[in-house]
Image (tube, helix red, strand yellow):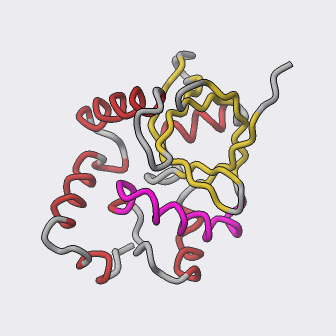
Amino acid sequence: MQKSAINQNEDSASQPLFYRGKQWLYRGQRPGWIAKIFNRMWAIKASKNALPNGLVALEVIGRKSGRVISFPLVMVTEDGQRYLISMLGDNTQWVRNVRATGGKAVLRRGGYEDVHLEEIPIDQRAPILKAYLQVASGARPHVPMDKDAPLAEFEKIAAEFPVFRLDSVQTK
């Protein structure tokens, strides 16, 4: 799907270079080795609460390795609920790992919070995707939609981007 002309022309001096760079880091909708290094760095910073704007580290058990995998994500809050969205779509490792664990994960941002991630049905994703693009500027090169597009446009791409609601798990 093509990006809208508005999205491509917004801040035309720096944005195309930024977008091309982000797309290059995630060629084939997968992080390359440089992106993996950056992701590790951002996950460490997010877990220490060193960064603003909803950046968090998600820890989930790898479905193949059995090791704890930490990944930086932007958390968005909409109508009092917290959500995580996969900017690269359905086939990412963190999404597969979350599904394999039945939604069990740990959210890190200055501390540890056991969470359960509940996948949101496709017909409910559009407003969350729109809110996500408002705050997650790094995701914009990967989502074929202008952040200010009408909600109806987000409904057309909702099936391509998994959205998970975070629910705190009360420990006994």
Q: How many marks?
A: 0
Q: Is residue 68 rendered to the left or right of residue 18?
A: right
- As drawn, the residue found furthest toward the left would be 13
On screen, 5 above or below 106?
A: below
- Is residue 164 within the magenta segment? no
Span shown in magenta: 121-140
| Quarter residue 95 falls in | top right
Q: Is residue 91 left or right of residue 77?
A: left
What quarter of the picture does the N terminus occupy? bottom left
Q: Residue at x 37, y 34 (%)?
A: 42
* Coordinates of residue 169 in the picture (x, y in percent): 78, 31
Q: Quadrant of residue 146?
A: bottom left
User: Is residue 138 within the magenta segment?
Assistant: yes
Give the residue at x 32% y 32%.
Answer: 36
Counting from the top left corner in percent of width and height, residue 87 is at 45, 54
Using the image, determine if residue 15 lies above or below residue 12: above
Going 39% across and 30% down the picture, which residue do you hit?
45
Tell me: residue 121, above or below residue 50: below
Residue 151 location, x and y as percent? 57, 79
* Image quarter in which the C terminus is found: top right
Outermost right residue = 172
Q: Residue at x 55, y 27 (%)?
A: 59
Q: Is residue 35 above or below residue 78?
A: above
* Closer to the camera in the image, 144 or 53: 53
Q: Main secondary structure of the magenta part?
A: helix
